[in-house]
Image (tube, rainbow, N blue to C red):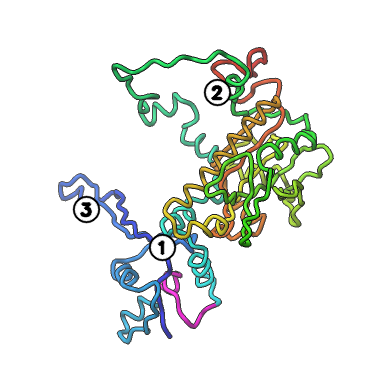
Amino acid sequence: MKYRRCHAVAVLPEEQTVFSLESLISGGDGIEYERRIRIYAAHLDAICTLELPACMLLLESSAEEWAPMPEDPERGALVAHLVELGLLMLDEEPDDSAVESDRHIRNNHWWPLSAIHYRHSRWDGIDSVGEMESNQMLTAQDLVRKLGAPPPEAPSRQPGAVALPRLPDDAVCMLPAQRVTCRNFDRSRALSLSLLAEMLQSVLMAQAVVESGYDARFLKKNVPSGGGLHPLEAYIIARDVEGLAPGIYHYHAVAHELARIAAQPADLDGFSQRLLAGQHWFVNAPVMVVLVCRFERNFWKYRRHVKAYRAVTLDAGHISQAFYTAATERGLGAFVTAAINEVEMEQALALDPMEQGTLAACGFGWRAPVMSMAELDPAQHVWRSAPAA
């Protein structure tokens, strides 16, 4: 039997302060520092804690070459412990879940640090709003009281800077200025299927399919994408769309059609609120668009590339801004958030997150006539006449 290390791990030494009565009695300040070694692996959701001997063995092990099991009993026990944690792999257990997950990481051409970051920055079961409320971190006043004043909103002006002319307030300039993230959706007003189709055609539909002649096809969309690869897929959560049963649908960008997924949440609003990490003000949107990246599409070209993951996050930004513009042009409210429980979507769609990963959620629909939740609209482009609750 032989073993080797998993493909990608990061070692993070951590320290935390603990109260020490012994230190206090002996004349100290009563504070000691507890040290631990935390291991983040690209193929494991769990964060492992190791003692120094086990950590040293892990780092000494090759991720490529198989090594025979050690004859020394103490070292053999360390190997067995690391195998149990999923950090070392055995050649005789190819069907082990950790081995299979590690194989996916190796085959999908992730840059190791990006893979570790994505795996361990995902949320599961987080109630971000509840945490903000319990920590009293909801308002600007709360934040300044807890954290102190923020860095300046803009850097200092430089002497000799060239003043630039301002454009007149024509329709082209006013459209992006009228963008205001919507936190107040009209729950009583459905979105028409034709308007949903317009939004998807404007932002996500493939305007052309480019045949390279070498068994590689590329899509031309209204939004840019790193390498022209367009790896982001859209899953539509339709809560209230005329002529469309509530549920989750996959949008096909070439065919311009919606396919209802087989397994549907029993409680769509509850699912949406969990997905949105408790951001209840977005749940009333009649449509949400969840952006899921097919990493293999991006990594086909950008293999183990240090910029590849950054490029797909930029793709999500392009799409969300395009939804804002399209919604504003049609008199709709819109939002985007990355504060989501990605695992909720993974479970609904049976996704391996390192192959198809959730990045963000967008949404749009008709605004409510009354502003119950605060919106950032200092120029009163949206709330000129509508009253606040």
Compared with 157, 270 (above or below) is below
Mark 1 or 3, nearer chain start: 3
Q: Amino acid at mark 1?
A: Cys
Corner quadrant of residue 330: top right
- Kindly check if marks 1 and 2 are in contact, taking CB atoms under 8 A apart as contact: no
**Disc on the earlier residue, 1 or 2:** 1
Indicate the position of residue 152 as horizontal and vertical percent values: 36, 24
Q: CA distance from mark 1 to mark 3?
A: 29 Å
Residue that carries the numbered disc 1 in the rendered image: 48
On the question of residue 26 being in view, the answer is yes
Decide: few, some or many residues near mark 1? Use Cα within 10 Å; few <14, some 14-19, many ≥20.
some
**Residue under the point 42% across and 73% down:** 88
Residue name at image x 41 percent, y 79 percent: 3
The secondary element bearing badge 1 is classed as strand
Asked if the magenta segment contains residue 295, the reply would be: no
Q: Give yes or no for residue 88 being in the magenta stretch.
A: yes
Circle number at residue 376:
2
Specify whether 188 is left or right of 215: right
In the rendered image, is residue 127 in sight? no
Relative side of 329 to 129, left or right: right
Q: Secondary structure at mark 2?
A: loop
Give the x, y percent position of residue 329: 67, 26
Alpha-carbon span between mark 1 and mark 2: 42 Å
Q: Is residue 95 left or right of residue 193?
A: left
* Residue that carries the numbered disc 3 in the rendered image: 22
Residue furthest left in the image: 27
In front here: 315 or 133?
Answer: 315
First reached walking from the N terminus: tag 3 or tag 2? 3
